[in-house]
Amino acid sequence: MSKEKIEIEFRPIKKIVIFQTLELSMDELFKRMGLIARMGQPLALHWAEGMLFVYAPFHPECDVITEEAMEGNMYWGSVLFSPMPKYEPLKKIGGIEIPIIDQTPDPIMRQVAEWLKGRKEQ
């Protein structure tokens, strides 16, 4: 095992660009997530600040996006969201369990949730 010191660098996220948002009722959001889970896709919903949401990252094969990521810019293709005042760690839909991650400790996810609240009011 090498005893050489390595450099560790932290590059925080500076900006999240979201291309599409869609507010749904909580029932509709869970219905859609249940369909995705039935297709065998891994799935977890996020919760913070009274908002339930799921995002799809934007993954184009492009050097510009890679450079942007190195500068702290993250790109999300879409976000589906719904108000959910009280946190629940798990939701059962037709025999499928969908985990809900409490993102309260994550300041970035809390900011996303607050931003989504503002979108809801528009």
Image: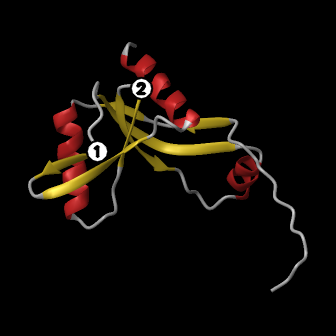
Q: 101 left or right of 104? A: left
Separation (CA) of disc 1 from disc 2:
14 Å
> Residue 119, how many percent across, how many down?
42, 20
Callout 2 crowding tier (Cα within 10 Å): few <14, some 14–19, many ≥20: many
Q: Amino acid at mark 2?
A: Glu
Q: Which mark is residue 20?
A: none
Q: Is residue 120 above or below residue 102?
A: above
For the point 26% across and 31% down, which residue is it?
Answer: 24
> Residue 57, how many percent across, how many down?
50, 50
When asked about the image quadrant of residue 60, the answer is: bottom right
Is 28 or 110 nearer to us in this picture?
110
Q: Is residue 60 above or below residue 106?
A: below
For the point 85% across and 83% down, which residue is it?
Answer: 2
Q: Earlier in the sequence, mark 1 or mark 2?
A: 2
Q: Secondary structure at mark 2?
A: loop
Callout 1 crowding tier (Cα within 10 Å): few <14, some 14–19, many ≥20: few
Q: 29 left or right of 70? A: left
Q: Which residue is mark 2?
A: 49
